Image (cartoon, rainbow, N blue to C red):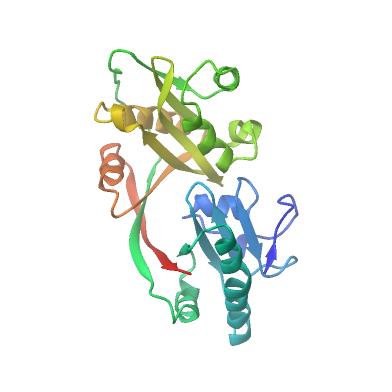
């Protein structure tokens, strides 16, 4: 497997992307930030992508024979797992984005105690016609150049709540602004809630949303979601919401906002 350093190289990525997974397909296609390994620099058939915002890996493509399977296993065990351990990362978390390689991947980890969790994906492609008011003292802002300049000047508090998410997903603010969108809610000049498009593939945009614990149960997340979805529609984008089964609050919020279910996938993880 070759690590792709120059994301601007011209390759045919059709075999190693999936419309269902913008969080990782956006990395494979070079749109957003993340690590990428492919099996062949000229005609890739297999890819491994790591998303900093998701915190895990995704495997795309196909393996056609025993030799290809063995080669991928050697890369994982001899290269990737050693690299992860050197960074004090002792767990390998991944999804499989092509059903044709499910059995092959499971065979690779015959000696591991693999744990699983269901992941649900939803999309919203229509306007949410609902006017909402923020609680007293709260204000919502679209993250544009003016807002980012104020962040850079230190005008607001707790800005890492936004900047960490944005800069682990996009190479710089220009990349973010040209491909994505975000909203922040401030309380007394402090960033207390964020919704951010962390990846984009074709016209699908992945959502990351978080509210500080002290400011939850105030409908802030839903209000941000309404603004985000409606702004996506105006830009010709479709918002995608991914959440694991254990995150009941995220699941309920997606349903409340009228997102429609598109697929169920499995997240795998084990100690390396």
Report the residue at 50% width, 26% height from top.
159
Q: Tell me the quarter of the image containing the N terminus.
A: bottom right
Residue 249: quarter of image: top left
Residue 111: quarter of image: bottom left
Q: Nearer the viewer, residue 177 or 135?
A: 135
Residue 154 versus residue 214 in the image, above or below: above
Residue 101 versus residue 55 in the image, above or below: below
Residue 180 appears in the figure: no
Q: Position of residue 42 (x, y in %)?
A: 75, 66
Report the residue at 30% width, 18% height from top.
134
Q: Position of residue 127 (x, y in %)?
A: 37, 31
Residue 103 versus residue 150 in the image, above or below: below
Residue 12 versus residue 64 in the image, above or below: above
Furthest-bottom residue in this view: 66
Q: Nearer the viewer, residue 130 or 147?
A: 147
Total label count? Answer: 0
Q: Position of residue 131 (x, y in %)?
A: 30, 20
> In the shown orientation, is residue 253 left or right of residue 97?
left
> In the shown orientation, is residue 243 left or right of residue 36?
left
Report the residue at 60% width, 40% height from top.
170
Q: Nearer the viewer, residue 17 or 188?
A: 188
> In the shown orientation, is residue 240 left or right of residue 134?
right
Q: Position of residue 136 (x, y in %)?
A: 28, 13
Report the residue at 74% width, 52% height from top.
6
Residue 244 appears in the figure: yes
């Amino acid at each position: 497997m070759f690590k792709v350093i120059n994301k601007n190289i011209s390759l045919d990525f059709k075999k190693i992307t999936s419309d269902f997974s913008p969080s990782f397909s956006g990395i494979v296609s070079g749109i957003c930030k993340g690590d990428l390994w492919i099996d062949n620099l000229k005609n890739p058939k297999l890819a491994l992508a790591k998303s900093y915002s998701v915190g895990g890996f995704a495997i795309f493509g196909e393996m056609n024979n025993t030799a290809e399977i063995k080669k991928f296993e050697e890369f994982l065990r001899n290269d990737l797992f050693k690299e992860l351990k050197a960074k004090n990362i002792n767990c390998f978390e991944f999804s499989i984005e092509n059903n044709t390689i499910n059995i092959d991947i499971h065979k690779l980890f015959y000696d591991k105690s693999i744990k699983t969790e269901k992941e649900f994906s939803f999309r919203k492609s229509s306007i949410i016609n609902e006017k909402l008011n923020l609680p007293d003292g709260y204000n919502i802002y679209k993250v544009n150049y003016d807002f980012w300049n104020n962040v850079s000047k230190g005008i607001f508090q707790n800005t890492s709540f936004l900047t960490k998410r944005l800069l682990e997903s996009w190479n710089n603010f220009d990349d973010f602004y040209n491909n994505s969108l975000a909203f922040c809610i401030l309380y007394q000049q402090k960033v207390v809630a964020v919704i951010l498009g962390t990846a984009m593939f074709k016209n699908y945009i992945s959502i990351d949303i978080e509210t500080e614990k002290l400011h939850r149960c105030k409908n802030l997340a839903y209000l941000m979601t309404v603004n985000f979805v409606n702004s996506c529609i105006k830009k010709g984008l479709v918002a995608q919401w991914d959440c694991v089964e254990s995150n009941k609050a995220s699941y309920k919020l997606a349903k409340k906002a009228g997102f429609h279910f598109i697929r169920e996938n499995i997240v795998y993880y084990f100690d390396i």
